[in-house]
Image (tube, grey):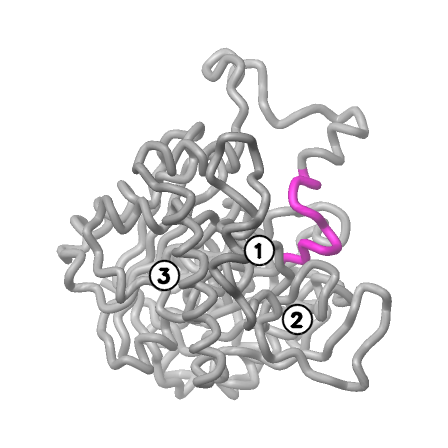
Amino acid sequence: MAEAFIVAAVRTAAGRRHGRLSGWHPADLGAQVLNALVDRTGIDPAAVEDVIMGCTMQVGEQSNNVARNAVLASKLPESVPGTSIDRQCGSSQQALHFAAQAVMSGTQDCVIAAGVESMTRVPMGTASSLPRKAGLGFYMSPEMQVRYPGIEFSQFLGAEMLAKKYGLSKDRLDRFSYESHQRAIAATHAGRFRAEIVPVAVKRSDGGSDNGELHTVDEGIRFDVSLEGIAGVKLLQEGGVITAANASQIADGATGVMVVSERGLKALGLKPLARVHHLSLLGHDPVIMLEAPIPATQRALQKAGLSIDDIDAFEVNEAFAPVPLAWLQATGADPAKLNVNGGAIALGHPLGASGTKLMTTLIHVLQQRGGRYGLQTMCEGGGMANVTIIERL
């Protein structure tokens, strides 16, 4: 069977809402990642046969096919097409799946899978709220409402439901969040993110810049974090356990990986970082919504012929602390292998960009630790999850 290889993986450091990346138009920010992938591989830009870009809020500055717009803002020639993917938070992980499937099919030899999201400039929820305000209706159809009468699809309610189902106390969630920051702080101080981050100019939402300063450190990390500070953050709902401190941070960012076939490796003279070992996805309960990574992981390992102990590093998106904690509890994975450099609670979750963001970190973690297999999964709106297993080469 034909195989897919990842030859480069990069990301911007995440920016806080109204922070150091907020002055970037999303297409221009995405273009920075496309340029970096071409620069790092040294290939002829015209050799790229497609750009598949994840983006969740595809309205405003992220509308009209932001992938193609990022191509037109980059050094790639006009001959390179682009298409935009929305699988909610898993959008750019799905972009990677499509890119891998394209080269595995033999129809293409070099595809970029990427993601971009400016949560400052196109806020979360805009894709559904703005059309509704304009009288263009709501995404829940009459037949959906017959099937789910009176049900509100809410990730926040889903997080509360997940915590209750798995017996996760607020204290446990807060401690996990504190650990996420501590891991991110340690990784930053040790320089473990340096190879994966593309430096970009600071552009604030007020139009100002910081005298040519480059953005190279994830802005959401709280270097002065304390468990007491996390524990003191207000609950999102009375009687619940979820707070802004034990949930992922709103963030701006762009990420991407270059995927090539074996023929592409030879033709372009590239050395692979990793081989795509397994790709799968699964739909699950859309009400609890965030539990899908558990059955998706279990099925993926079975299909791949691997056990949980065969995996050397895991990236499970920290949309809310209950997600990775429930996943750990259900799968029996070693906590020491999970999100070793911190996760979205500390580093930020730029929605459609997070899939290739996690993959970029996973590849570099395997390189730094000498591991063989890495597994990535994340919860997605609508109750879905992608799973990607890679083998370091």
Query: How far is mark 1 from mark 2, CA to CA?
Result: 23 Å
- Left or right: where 217 falls relative to 162: right
Q: Name the residue carrying label 3.
A: 315
Please name the amino acid that badge 3 sits on. Answer: Glu
The front one of 40 and 15 is: 15
User: In which quadrant will I find the C terminus?
Assistant: bottom left
Q: Name the residue carrying label 1.
A: 249
Find out whether the residues at labels 2 and 3 contact each other: C-beta distance under 8 Å. no
Which is more foreground, mark 3 or mark 1?
1
Residue 125 magenta-drawn?
yes
Indicate the secondary structure of the residue bearing disc 2: helix
Residue at the (38%, 73%) spot, across then down: 6
Q: Residue 121: image x %, image y %?
A: 75, 55
Total labels drawn: 3
Q: Which quadrant of the structure image shows residue 159?
A: top left
Q: Which quadrant of the structure image shows residue 51?
A: bottom right
The disc, 1 or 2, on the residue closer to the chain's N-terminal end is: 2
Residue at the (66%, 71%) spot, across then down: 31
Highlighted range, magenta: 117-127
Q: Residue 10: image x %, image y %?
A: 51, 75
Residue at the (37%, 41%) spot, across then down: 169
